[in-house]
C-alpha cells in the first residue's frame, strides 16, 4: 500500500529555501529531541476539541497553543487565523495539524450514513505519549484494565485475530466468535466487529450489522511533553441512543479514569529503551513502531507511505 504524503510540490515556496523562515511543522520537528522512533509524529492530525462545542477556545498541541474558532465547517481543511495550523471537523471532533507542505496521514473517512454522537468523554494524563498509544493496542489492556462485567466476561479464553494492513496502520478482525463483550450481545448475531489502528493515535472500533453501525473512537493527543489527553467518543446509527448520552459518557469517563490510573502508575517507565517484542501479544506494538517509522521515512524522503504490516493471524489468551 503506497500513499503520497506531499500536498505541494517540493519546489514550491516553503522551508526548502534557506532564507525562508522555518514553518511551524519544521520548528516543532527541530524541537523534538533524539530518537524519532519515540514521541508523537508532528505532521499528523490530533483531536483538540469536540465539534459540538461552538465557542472560540484554546487548545494545546505539541506544547503550542492553538486559537480555535467557534466553528470549523465539516469536510474542508481550514487554516487558523495565525496561519500556523490546519483544522478539520471530522467524526464529531476538531482535529489540528501544523500547516506545512508535508501532508499528514489521512483521517478515517466520514461515515456514509449520518451517525449520532451518543457518548463523549476525555481525560488528561501525565503520561508518556507512546505508552498511552500502546494502551490502545495491547491485547492485555482491556482484560487487565477495563473489567466491568458488561464489557468483558470474566472467563479466560483463547482469541485468534486476523491482522491486515489498512491505510496508515492495520486492522484486526476476530477469527473466532467475538464473545468477550457482553454489551455487543445487544446487537444482532450477524454483527461484524473490526478494530482499526491508524497513525498517529487513532483506535477505531466498528460494529456493523444489518441496518446498524457503531463507531467507538479512542485517540491520544500530545498536549505537551509528558502530557496527553485521551478522548473517547461513540457514534451510532440509532439516533434514539442520544438520550442515553449522559449515562454512556459517564461509562466512558470511568474507562478513561482506569486508563489514566494505569498510565500514571507507569509514568517514569517510558518505552524509550531498546525495543524488545515477545510473541503474538506484542505484535501490534511492533506494528505500531514499524508504522510510525514508515511514516517518518516517507515524510522525510518525500516518498509514498509504504505500509510495513503484512497480513497475519495472532493468538493469545485473555
Ligand atoms: Fe483503555
Image: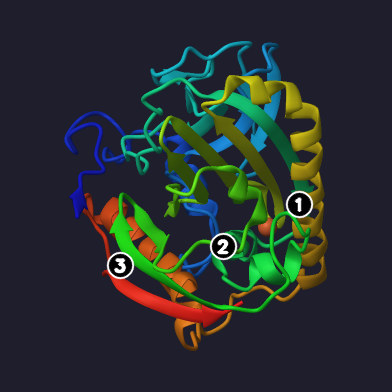
Q: In which quadrant of this rendering is ligand 1 seen?
A: bottom right
Q: Nearer the viewer, residue 222 or 53?
A: 53
Q: CA distance from mark 2 to mark 1?
A: 20 Å
- Which residue appears at 51% of the width and 61% of the height? 178
Q: Position of residue 146 (x, y in %)?
A: 74, 61
Question: Is disc 1's CB within 8 Å of ligand 1?
Answer: yes
Q: Is residue 196 left or right of residue 131?
A: left
Q: Is mark 3 within 8 Å of ligand 1?
A: no
CA–CA distance in space, label 2 to label 3:
26 Å
Quick one: label 2, few (<14), some, or many (20+) residues within 10 Å? some
Residue designated by label 2: 179
Residue 69 position (above or below residue 215): above
Q: Is residue 220 visible?
A: no
Quadrant holding the C terminus: bottom right
Q: Is residue 30 above or below residue 70?
A: below
- Assess disc 3: are there few (<14), some (14-19) or many (≥20) residues with their C-alpha within 10 Å of its C-alpha: many
Give coordinates of residue 93: x percent, y percent.
57, 28
Q: Is residue 53 visible?
A: yes
Packing grade of label 1 (10 A; few <14, some 14-19, many >=20) is many
Q: Please say if 285 is above or below 56.
A: below
Evaluate if marks 3 and 1 touch, with contact meaning CB atoms under 8 Å apart: no
Q: Label 1: state its secondary structure.
A: helix
- Find the distance from the CA under tag 3 to the CA under tag 1: 29 Å
- Give the camera-side residue of 32 and 178: 178
Which residue is drawn at the image coordinates 46% and 70% (left, top)? 284
Asked whether the residues under the numbered discs 2 and 3 touch, taking CB atoms below 8 Å apart as contact, a structural biologist would say no
User: Disc 3 marks which residue?
Assistant: 309
Tell me the number on the disc at residue 255: 1
Q: How is the image coloured?
A: rainbow
* Precedes in sequence: disc 2 or disc 1: 2
Amino acid at each position: 500500500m503506497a500513499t503520497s504524503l506531499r500536498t505541494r510540490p517540493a519546489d514550491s515556496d516553503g522551508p526548502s529555501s534557506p532564507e525562508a523562515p522555518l514553518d511551524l511543522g519544521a520548528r516543532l520537528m527541530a524541537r523534538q529531541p533524539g530518537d524519532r522512533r519515540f514521541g508523537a509524529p508532528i505532521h499528523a492530525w490530533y483531536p483538540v476539541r469536540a465539534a459540538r462545542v461552538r465557542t472560540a477556545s484554546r487548545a494545546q498541541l505539541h506544547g503550542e497553543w492553538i486559537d480555535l474558532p467557534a466553528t470549523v465547517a465539516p469536510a474542508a481543511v481550514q487554516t487558523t487565523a495565525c496561519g500556523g495550523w490546519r483544522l478539520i471537523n471530522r467524526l464529531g471532533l476538531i482535529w489540528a495539524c501544523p500547516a506545512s507542505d508535508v501532508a499528514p496521514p489521512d483521517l478515517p473517512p466520514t461515515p456514509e450514513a449520518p451517525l449520532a454522537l451518543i457518548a463523549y468523554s476525555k481525560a488528561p494524563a501525565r503520561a508518556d505519549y507512546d505508552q498511552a498509544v500502546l494502551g490502545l493496542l495491547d491485547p492485555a489492556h482491556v482484560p487487565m484494565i477495563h473489567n466491568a462485567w458488561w464489557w468483558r466476561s470474566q472467563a479466560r479464553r483463547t482469541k485468534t485475530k486476523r491482522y491486515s494492513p489498512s491505510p496508515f496502520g492495520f486492522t484486526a478482525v476476530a477469527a473466532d466468535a467475538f464473545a468477550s463483550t457482553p454489551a455487543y450481545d445487544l446487537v444482532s448475531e450477524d454483527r461484524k466487529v473490526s478494530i482499526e489502528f491508524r497513525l498517529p493515535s487513532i483506535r477505531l472500533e466498528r460494529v456493523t450489522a444489518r441496518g446498524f453501525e457503531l463507531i467507538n473512537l479512542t485517540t491520544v493527543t500530545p498536549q505537551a511533553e509528558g502530557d496527553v489527553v485521551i478522548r473517547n467518543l461513540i457514534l451510532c446509527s440509532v439516533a434514539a441512543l442520544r438520550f442515553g448520552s449522559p449515562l454512556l459518557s459517564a461509562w466512558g469517563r470511568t474507562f478513561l479514569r482506569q486508563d489514566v490510573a494505569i498510565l500514571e502508575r507507569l509514568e517514569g517507565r517510558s518505552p524509550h529503551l531498546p525495543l524488545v517484542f515477545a510473541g503474538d501479544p506484542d505484535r501490534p506494538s511492533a506494528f505500531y513502531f514499524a508504522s510510525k517509522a514508515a511514516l517518518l521515512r516517507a515524510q522525510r524522503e518525500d516518498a509514498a507511505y509504504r505500509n510495513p504490516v503484512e497480513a497475519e493471524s495472532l493468538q493469545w489468551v485473555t
